[in-house]
Amino acid sequence: MDDRSFKLILGSLMHDLGKVVYRARQIDSRAHPLSGHTLVSQFLDDPDVAEIILYHHAKDLRSAKISNDSLAYIAYCADNIAAAADRREVEGEIQSGFDPGRPLASVFNLLNNNESQMNHRMCNAEEFNPPGKISEIHTSEYNRLVQELKSGLGAINWEPEYINSVLELLEAHLSFVPSSTMTGEVPDISLYDHLRLTAALACCIYQYLHSLNRLDFRQELLEREAEFYEEQAFVMFSCDISGIQPFIYTIASKGALKALRARSFYLEVLIEHIVDLILNANSLSRANLIYTGGGHAYILLPNTGEVLSRCQDILNNINRWFISTMGTGLFIAYAFQACSGNELMNIPRQQNPYQGIFRSLSRQLGEKKLKRYDADDIRRLNIASANNSGRECSSCGAVDQLLDSEDICQLCASLHDLSREITRSDTVLVVTQEKAAGQTRVILPNADGYDCFLTAVPAADVNRILNQEAGNILAVYAINKMYTGYKYSTRLWMGNYFDDSGGEMPTFERLAERKEGIERIAVLRADVDNLGAAFISGFVRKKEKDEAKRNRYLTLSRYATLSRQLSMFFKYHINGLLRGDAGMDKRFSLGPDSAHPRRKAVIVYSGGDDMFIVGAWDQVIELAIDLRRAFRVYTVNSLTFSAGIGIYPDKYPVSRMAIEVAELEQAAKEIDEDKDALALFGQSMIKDKRGNLSLKADHLYKWRDFEDGVVLQKLRLLQDYFRSAGDERQAFGNSFLYRLYGYLSTAGDDPINLARYAYLLSRMAPSGQSVPQRERELYQQFSSLMYQWILNERDRRELVTAILLFVYLSRKRKED
């Protein structure tokens, strides 16, 4: 990264910091460019950065005495595209029309035709901050924020290697600060999201104009501003890793949970590493990363031949590395779509060009996946197959690169070691070109197609490694923590919770252990419903008749904010929700007692829009409802997710668990058009009228029906009735319910079974003169409801599920 690029990023990232100072009126009430310059100049004395901050509005630029190649012109243009409007009003300069106390509105307020008016309180990005009825941000909060920014800026090392530290500082403090407080705008874009997108656009504009030797930025971007917005100066890049599920789930049963977590962790780091290879090769920062998660990424690039050629070379080299290392196991598809500033601003709105960008990328990725390999790649695959030893890795089944002394491949052996390291809270990941000091070294692809190395080290050792091997370091990754003092450091948000009551990653066996009830584990798979449609057209206001008004909220800023908010929920806040410290008022419990604050579970994967969690069977069901409740609050009811939950013995093959729960998840998504459902336990083979066989989920519910109808109504009735009685009735309860379960399966179609059901209920009636009246009343209520429910198909299905839950919760070990 050259010096001018570095200064452009810095200036763009800090050009609007004066808004924070201006809103803390007791400190500085001047227009925000002046306030911002005063703030930043205390820590960074650079004329290029100063010009960006002072002159990023048209009025100021036209009268400024600066050179025609000043970076301020680029920041001005990038600021307009990021804001999707040419703001002539300057906060602080124009007193009317602005409300400095306006809070940040939820980006979900407008999603999927929602009409909510929920806002966020101002806090650090790490806090779980679901929207609520927040009416005002007081100036004292901005005063506090100014002091925090000063403290953070004072600790920054102003060198290119520390650029990600600046991004992390701004993310930490400005994620819940509105970019604009103008009363005529929707304030749902945070100041952090606006600043990072401005920096991303500015770098693209700079490289694009340099590639064409058009260096009179005043002429290009101020005098010919409208013409430049028509030029395809940008490229939206997308990549997607195929083969993720087989890579994660095709493992041996021994130490399966550690292996699952390590392989999932590896893939999360892999996509971040590939993103950094592309960004670093093109002198870009992580501000240009629009989204990453689930093996997928979007990056905003400059539209130059050199950049596109560089990216293609890197990605083709990575695919060749996959062939030599993993055969056909993994493959990365990629796509480029050139676009203009107007298209990123969705102009003209009547034509909705923004949607076309992502539809084209999706189509290109699909085509790339159908034509993975060229002739040279196929020859490499044939050579690799011919050279394998015939022995299989005992963990993943691979037949090449096995270690001489063991029946395990090099990658599995290193991932096994990594599984120990990632359980430590102070672990930092260092990526090096050559092997570095450290116990765990996992191979990754380098930009040239050769190996580089991922090393897990304690945080205390990072500075030593950076000093000793300065030229060897490619990246430093801190998990859920910010280390602004490290070169090349990037904080990765990651769903990495595990129940550590035993001091280390639990096994399936330990998760299944319990004092009462059936010893089983459960697997949860879930993802957001209709998210693709939400990203393409979620901000279209369908009730508006005017086409321009319908599409006015379709902007890159809004989608970048939406992506980041979803990532924060699934990659970070999910950890606090499972720990029990994320601020949710009440945790769900299958039993009448309060839920345990820490869930007995392990996040195998959570990111982007989906999750895979393993844990004690009852707690997985409980945490699924907790997450669903939290997600609905977090997204102000604009998004839902559907899930499958399978329950298994701890020795059940992992690959089968993954397949079966995926089928349950799919069944939940097919319940109806709105989805928002849960399928659990398993599926049965059914035959239609023509004799065709198919699978049907036995216990498929809308979340609300499961929560209210199955658990809070029917399961609670069973618990209250049997557990309030003496030992005799409790002992009789399970055998009674086993028989009842069989009758319920056909009671709606068979009058004989209906009669048997009534007879069975009558046998439960307390008899004898000594029976207390209260017990007789309890039985009357119980039998009346039980008989009423069998006559209704929906109630009958819910009762069947409730009986299974009750039996699983109360089953004795000898019955297991």
Image (tube, rainbow, N blue to C red):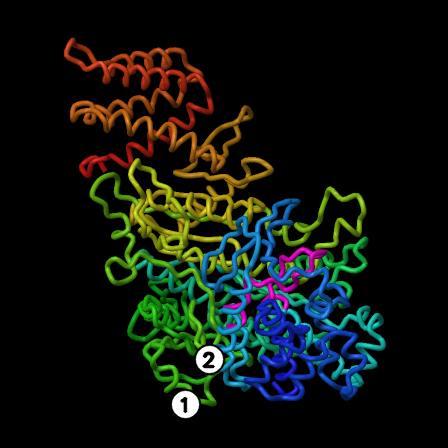
In screen coordinates, is 98 left or right of 505? right
Local packing at callout 1 (Cα closer than 10 Å; few below 14, some 14-19, many 20+) is few
Whether 89 is drawn above or below 573: the answer is below
Q: Position of residue 222 (x, y in %)?
A: 81, 77
Residue 361 is situated, as x and y percent measured from the top left of the image, at 68, 61
Q: Quarter of the image containing the N terminus? A: bottom right
Nearest to the observer: residue 291 or residue 47: 47
Please report the residue visible at 39 percent of the width from the left and 23 percent of the height from the top: 745
Return the residue at label 2.
452
Q: What are the residue bounds of the magenta stretch?
A: 168-194
> SS of the residue at dot 2?
strand
Real-space Cα separation, disc 1 to disc 2, in angstroms: 19 Å
**Which image quadrant: the C terminus?**
top left
Residue type at numbered disc 1 = Asn
Task: Kindly identify the residue that appears in the image at 44 percent across and 73 percent down.
Answer: 482
Q: Choose mark 1 or mark 2, whichever is in front.
A: 1
Whether residue 282 is visible, yes or no, is no
Q: Is residue 94 visible?
A: yes
Q: Is residue 696 above or below residue 428?
A: above
Which is more toward the observer, 566 or 137?
137
Per the rendering, the mark at residue 467 is 1
Q: Residue furthest left?
A: 770
Residue 192 covered by magenta stretch: yes
Q: Is residue 311 above or below residue 352?
A: below
Q: Is residue 811 left or right of residue 331?
A: left
How dense is the environment of label 2, judged by Cα within 10 Å: few (below 14), some, or many (20 and up)?
Answer: many
- Three-letter code, disc 2: Cys
**Residue 115, quarter of the rendered image:** top right
Compared across the picture, whether 388 is left or right of 165 comes to left
Q: Residue at x 72, y 56 (%)?
A: 184
